[in-house]
Image (cartoon, rainbow, N blue to C red):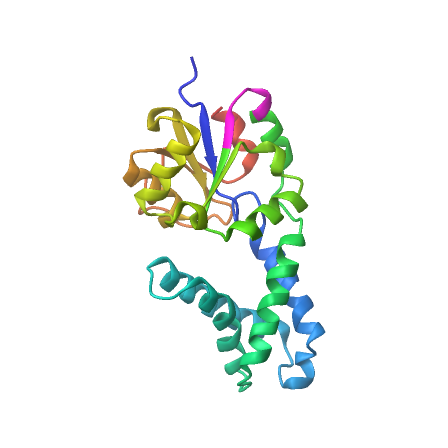
Amino acid sequence: MKKYNHLFFDLDHTIWDFETNAKEAMCQSFRENNLFNKGIPDYELFYEKYSEHNHRLWDRYSKGFIKQDELKWKRIWLALLDFKIADEHLAKKMSGEFLSILPQQKKVFPYTYEILNYLKNKKYRLHLITNGFNEIQYNKLRNADLTDFFEEVITSEVSGSLKPDKEIFSFALKKTNASVEESIMIGDNIEADIKGAQNFGMDTIFVNHIHMDASNITPTFEIRHLKELENIF
């Protein structure tokens, strides 16, 4: 009898190529608002600044220091300020555009559809645990033709907690009627996915797409390409 029955995937950066999709979505808003003529000559530099602020504000959001709405627009506002554009209205406009465009993007990591079909055909029960916003994550799944692969989608918004908190993993097991012994977390984020699941007592698969040094953790398994899941399941 197979040990695992319930496979809990992360979405962004694990199967849905967040970085590629986000960069394209932000570029569309950048162009539509003609930021070249507002004093930002280099989109790559703007996106780099945005990413820095986004990472820092997500950390503050995950620790409960700021609210969701503040995160959404302030990451763009701070990036604009780096170029001496103090325009809160523009930041909020771009935030709305970005969050509208982002879920329409469809780029997934290589072998995503093949591995999900493989696992479904082997009768594994697939679910998602994601820190993303509820409506946005569902739209991503629908537009990328991923919806039918997953039985349950557990978002931080619905569960009331964020990975790596134990509460979101507990919520996920109750929602799916799964035991921790038959469950495994599959994700790319060392803190949120791997350490979070380990602290809850769940086995883990570290999806190391970017070949980072993960010597400070010991996941149950580590892969560098989704096809390698076939060696585990």
Q: Which residues are magenta?
A: 120-126
User: Does the stretch in magenta take in 121?
Assistant: yes
Residue located 70% across and 73% down the image:
31
Residue reaching furthest top? 1
Q: Is residue 214 left or right of residue 26?
A: left
| Whether residue 206 is visible | no
Quadrant of residue 92 within the rendered picture: bottom right
Q: How many marks?
A: 0
Expressed as whole percent of the image width and height from the top left, the position of residue 232 reads: 47, 26
Residue located 62% across and 57% down the image:
102
Quadrant of the drawing holding the N terminus: top left
From what the image shows, is residue 87 above or below residue 43? Answer: below
Expressed as whole percent of the image width and height from the top left, the position of residue 194 reads: 37, 42
From what the image shows, is residue 75 above or below residue 180? Answer: below
Q: Is residue 3 left or right of residue 143?
A: left
Expressed as whole percent of the image width and height from the top left, the position of residue 60 reads: 36, 64
Query: Which residue is nearer to you in this view: 92 or 211?
Result: 92
Quadrant of residue 177 within the rendered picture: top left
Query: Which residue is nearer to you in this view: 113 or 92?
Result: 92
Query: Which residue is nearer to you in this view: 214 or 199?
Result: 199
User: Does the stretch in magenta take in 76?
Assistant: no
Query: Which residue is nearer to you in this view: 201 or 74?
Result: 74
Residue located 38% across and 24% down the image:
182
Expressed as whole percent of the image width and height from the top left, the position of residue 186 reads: 45, 37
Residue located 41% across and 64% down the image:
67
| Whether residue 56 is visible | yes
Q: Is residue 225 left or right of residue 169?
A: right
